[in-house]
Image: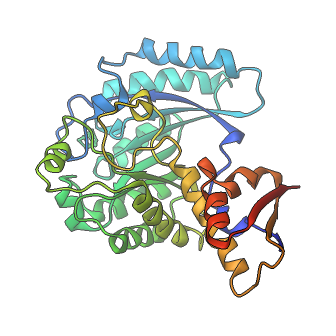
Amino acid sequence: MEINLDLKHELKNFSNKKEQYTIPIFIPHKGCPNNCVFCNQKKISGQLTDVTAQDVEDKIEEYLKYYSNSKKKIEVAFFGGSFTGIPIDKQIEYLQVANSYVKKGLVGAIRISTRPDYINRNILDTMKKYNVKTIELGVQSMDNEILTLSKRGHTALDVVNASKLIHEYGIVLGHQIMIGLPGSTRESEVYTIKECLKLQPQQLRIYPVYVIPDSELYSMYENSEYKPLSINEAVKRCKAVIHECQKTEISIIRLGLQSTDEITAKNSQLKGPVSDNLAEYVMASLVKDKIEKEIKDRKIDDGKLIINVLKKYVSICIGPKKINKIYFENKYNIKFIVKGG
Ligand code: SF4
């Protein structure tokens, strides 16, 4: 049996990161007054020191050495989740450095990430002044009970208000949501994404919850008060969220955490769906469902299933560690062949 597979719908929301370079600058919020159960920011960032304006400049210079001859867009991204919660003089110090590169035409855009309750008109005036193009909100959930269980310290209404204000200022809006928070279910996560999509964010990050040593969630895990998701469960839950995204044009700019030494280490202390390529598993599973739908009710009588796809989708069709190939070959007792054209 031979199938021509069109994956435009299944993978339409996954953004093509190849079009852009990011200069990531991690700003840990050392004085954060909040106490989200899943957080141990210093651990996850791998950075324990205070960031200075000089550090920002050094980082940008370091990356520009590699990127300067490229025609791709370059963006400076301040990650850390609470950028607008750090002292205003620090924010301005960092933004002044980044903006000087925008003015020189060496960097195309600046992005920051922050909490929904750290957005107001004064803050957005500052962001506008320093050419911040994109603001990502750490939504995590739109279910107030789950936000309370995670001790986020903000409500779903804060997300609504902040999102509307960011749109009003003409700044690109990104939402970050988490999969597998305490008390969270597939249904509450689908509810969350539906509520987010009503606010029309242009970009989305989906993070599965990792249990980080020294976080409150780690103690909850040790006391059997929290059960982390497995990779398989995380894949299923992410797919439920993505099915809602497929009804819109939102761009999923990240699924799963950035690969760090701690994530890839064999003796990692992290618990949960720890994987440096979760997105590949999720995409492969979406493709597997599509293939299964295509061959349903049809008979594979020649012992072969040949899938013709665009060249760029070949590895996704086969899946990481060949999971799709193994699945189809075992289930249907056939040879699974993917051809890229
Ligand atoms: S995740 Fe929560 S506790 Fe951690 S820095 Fe952000 S707001 Fe603070």
Query: Which quadrant holds the N terminus?
Result: bottom right
**Labels in figure, total:** 0
Which x, y percent locates residue 242?
53, 66
Is there any visible trace of residue 87 in the rendered image? Answer: no
89 relative position to 286: left or right: left
Residue sitting at x 70%, y 88%: 297
Say if 241 sits above or below 75 in the image: below
Q: Which residue is at 20% across, 67% downward?
A: 145
The colour style of the image is: rainbow
Query: Quick one: which residue is furthest to the right in this view?
Result: 341
In the figure, is residue 252 to the left or right of 126? right
Q: Residue furthest left?
A: 223
Residue at coordinates 41% horizontally, 42% vertically from top-left?
113
Judge left or right: residue 218 versus residue 78: left
Give coordinates of residue 147: x percent, y percent: 23, 60
Give the image location of residue 34, x and y in percent: 18, 43
**At x 79% / y 59%, what residue is drawn?**
337
Front-most of residues 287 and 133: 287
Quadrant of residue 310 in the image?
Answer: bottom right
Q: Position of residue 272 (x, y in %)?
A: 33, 49
Nearer to me, 179 or 81: 179
Tell me which image quadrant ligand 1 sits in: top left
Viewer can see residue 223? yes
Q: Nearer the viewer, residue 293 or 93?
A: 293
Q: Is residue 317 above or below residue 110?
A: below
Which of the image's four quarters has the C terminus? bottom right
